[in-house]
Amino acid sequence: MKKLNLTWLALIALTVTILSSCQTGESKEMTSEPVLAGENMVDISTATSDLDLNKLNLPQGFEIDIWAADVPNARSMTISDNGTIFVGNRHEDKVYALVDSDSDGKADKRFTLASDLRMPNGVAFKDGDLYVAEVSRILKFPDIESNLGNPTYEVIYDAYPEEGHHGWKFIAFGPDGMLYVPVGAPCNICESEDEVFASITRIDVSKDNPTPEVYAHGVRNTVGFDWDPASGNLWFTDNGRDMMGDDIPHCELNVAASAGQHFGYPYWHEGSVKDPEFGNAGEGQSAYVQPAAKLGAHVAPLGMRFYEGLMFPSTFKNQIFIAKHGSWNRSKKSGYTVTIAQKSGDQSIATEEDFITGWLDDDSQEVWGRPVDVQELPDGSLLISDDLANVIYRVTYKG
Ligand SMILES: [Ca+2]
Ligand SMILES: [Ca+2]
């Protein structure tokens, strides 16, 4: 017996040694973090939230409910061909996949696809693969739908700036098949020698060694964009500078009709307000693209999408839903709404009105929810992510 025990101990010791050395050797080469099937999934079908949705005001005929509870720091969203919703984080380090497997209008499975990422706010889906933007890296999760329980990723680009200030990203694929990736200004207000700051870049991720190019200049910090289904033009939100008082400058809704345009930052704000510090360093006002709409000062417009569904009344078709995250330093809070911006024909102007209010109590100044992104489901209902309440809402139209 004693001899057998010693043999077993020797075998165990040898196995541990081999495993340790393998792990040490592999960890230098690994670019992905495999998760065993099942370990990364949580059943959220019975997850509940104590939010009082009766506090929210919607137009006649619309209803709002919780689509997914318990989604920590729910930020930007994208949808797969199968209807899986992917959600990024800003203050947390994870990316989630949410699945409504029984099609009852509520998510029931939450997969954690990766952890330990740096502000993985941006998510985009193309040809079966999920792309995630951290601050300086673009990650690709190949064939993600087949690997929700066993996700791996590869780093396809790692040379975006490391600056954390406005470093979190919204990403999306354009009609040209390129991935559009903004790089925010690394400051409240500053002029940078590197043209990649305060820009929207695009990058061809189908290439082996993709290199980004600047598509739009003078964009302080966009955290949401989409392409007009009619014109193909890129529309994007932009967050205005701080420390010029409560009411200027406005945050913006912009249209980029072609590559190479300049949208004013840091020289001009909201199209017509010259920056007191940097204004004289730039061109005259007419050198810069005017915003399509002024959205209010400090309201923090983030996600925006053109509505292409059939569930809502036809007047909503091809109009723009905008999630306003809300002010952080205005003396009286503003934003904390979802709005609808109506285009004026093919022109690059729009008028805006409230679609959902009530997350902010104007009298008490208390806030219980902050909309981040909007995403249409195949049935035409609309999802809204909330990184304060840690939920995703679903808006339906009952008529
Ligand atoms: Ca379900
Ligand atoms: Ca501008």
Image: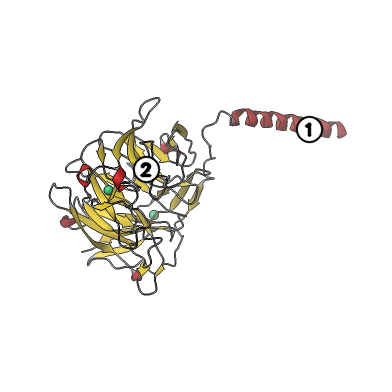
The alpha-carbon separation of the residues under discs 1 and 2 comes to 67 Å
Q: Where is residue 118 in the image (x, y as percent from the top left)?
A: 49, 44
Q: Quadrant of the N terminus?
A: top right
Q: In this view, does 385 lie to the left or right of 1?
A: left
- At x 40% / y 54%, what residue is drawn? 107
Q: Residue furthest left?
A: 345
Q: Which residue lies furthest to the right in this view?
A: 2
Of the image marks 1 and 2, the number of the one nearer the N terminus: 1
Q: Quadrant of ligand 1?
A: bottom left
- At x 47% / y 32%, what residue is drawn? 154
Q: Is residue 209 left or right of residue 312?
A: right
Image coloring type: secondary structure
User: Element type at marker 2?
Assistant: loop
Near mark 1 (Cα within 10 A), the count class, few <14, some 14-19 or many ≥20, is few
Q: Name the residue under label 2.
A: 191
Q: Where is residue 124 in the image (x, y as percent from the top left)?
A: 36, 41
Q: Identify which amino acid the numbered label 1 is placed on.
A: Trp
Q: Which residue lies furthest to the top in this view?
A: 208
Residue 127: mark: none
Residue 8: mark: 1
Q: In which quarter of the image is the C terminus?
A: bottom left
